[in-house]
Amino acid sequence: MNRHATTLASTAAVSSDKPPLWHRCRRWALPVLGLVVLGLLLSHAHKVDWAGAWEALQRYSAMLLLGVLGVATLSHALYGCFDLIGRRHTRHRLPRWRSWAIAVVSYAFNLNLGSLVGGIALRARLYARAGLDEATVAQIVGISLATNWLGYGLLAGSLFAAGAITPPREAHMGVDAFRAFGIGMVLLAVAYVVACFFLHGRHWQVKGRRLELPSAQLALVQLGFSAANWAVMGCAMYLLLGQKVPYTTVLGVLLAASIVGVVTPIPAGLGVIEAVYLALFSGTVRQGTLMGAVLAYRALYYLLPLAGGIVLYLLLERYAARHPVAGEGGHGG
């Protein structure tokens, strides 16, 4: 091969190793989008009634805050059950308490640091320390994600279809279109259960990994636990708003704010969730009262559970160090 041909071949090899243009653009687009959104939120921060928010926080009784903390704890405990569903599906031999604890820790980190850190990386580390192989961990994470968002779709879709909340003008979406969107979400959840009923037992290879749908019975358990978790989250905000707004409205707004917070590449949806609440509750709840409730919700549902999650994470790491896995995958038949 001549010198020119060698150069062309090496150039082609280097080019083939480069990631596609879309992946390179997305790598920069998400952080830029996050900075733009954060800048817009900061530019409007002076318009928020911070004094009213502080007064609202001071009016909360200790009993109410303890009650909301109890509701938040229940929600985190319910989320921990998502990995027990994954345990049932994959049939791994890890103790139930350890699977549940790993899910609770990952959820606390997920809420505050993002899904890549909490939902995937931290969970993968803790399961690997427990002896599970990558394929099993991938199935557990997949079941957990499916459980969370299919239950979300069932509950949110039902509320949107029923007209529990009205989309703001900024959304550029009519009421009928919003209801149709909700119906589509419900149908997607129903389609999942139907697919599990007819296709359970079949296997597919996706990027070299074996994929199998759970049974229809387990799919219904997924929807039940997830819908219950989202409903409990709505209960926490409902209590903080003094039960002055209908529960279905509060839940619908929380569900809308949650999906916007996930889509926007800002850890914990900081500022984004608050903006959605202000937009959807405009004219319904005083701004100071609303911001006080949102700040209290962040403290009780995000920050305090994160502190508990850090302690639980350290305990899990200590347990793993004292009980090392003896070279087996930990996956049972």
Image: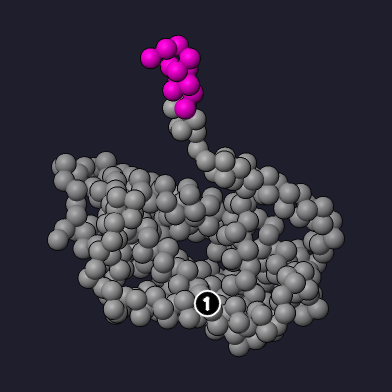
Residue 92 appears at what percent x and percent y? 21, 59
Residue 197 appears at what percent x and percent y? 29, 79
The colouring scheme, among rainbow, by chain, secondary structure or one colour, is one colour
Residue 87's image quarter? bottom left
Residue 87 higher or lower than 221, as above or below: above
Extent of the magenta region: 1-12
Residue 125 appears at what percent x and percent y? 35, 45
Residue 298 appears at what percent x and percent y? 61, 62
User: From where the camera sits, is residue 224 visible?
Assistant: yes
Q: Which amino acid type is shown beneath numbered disc 1?
A: Met
Q: Residue at x 63, y 56 (%)?
A: 264
Dot 1, how many residues are within 10 Å of its Cα: few (below 14), some (14-19), or many (20+)? many
Residue 294's image quarter? bottom right
Residue located farthest toward the top when viewing the structure as drawn: 3
Q: Secondary structure at mark 1?
A: helix
Residue 129 higher or lower than 5, as above or below: below
Q: Quadrant of the C terminus?
A: bottom left
Residue 286's image quarter? bottom right
User: From where the camera sits, is residue 75 visible?
Assistant: no
The residue beneath circle 1 is 185
The question of residue 8 being in magenta is answered with: yes
Residue 15 higher or lower than 88, as above or below: above
Q: Residue at x 25, y 48 (%)?
A: 133
Asked whether, in this view, residue 41 is left or right of residue 224, the answer is right
Decide whether the magenta segment is chiefly helix, strand or loop: helix
Q: Quadrant of the N terminus?
A: top left
Q: Residue at x 63, y 63 (%)?
A: 260
Residue placed most toward the observer, 320 or 175: 175
The question of residue 327 being in magenta is answered with: no
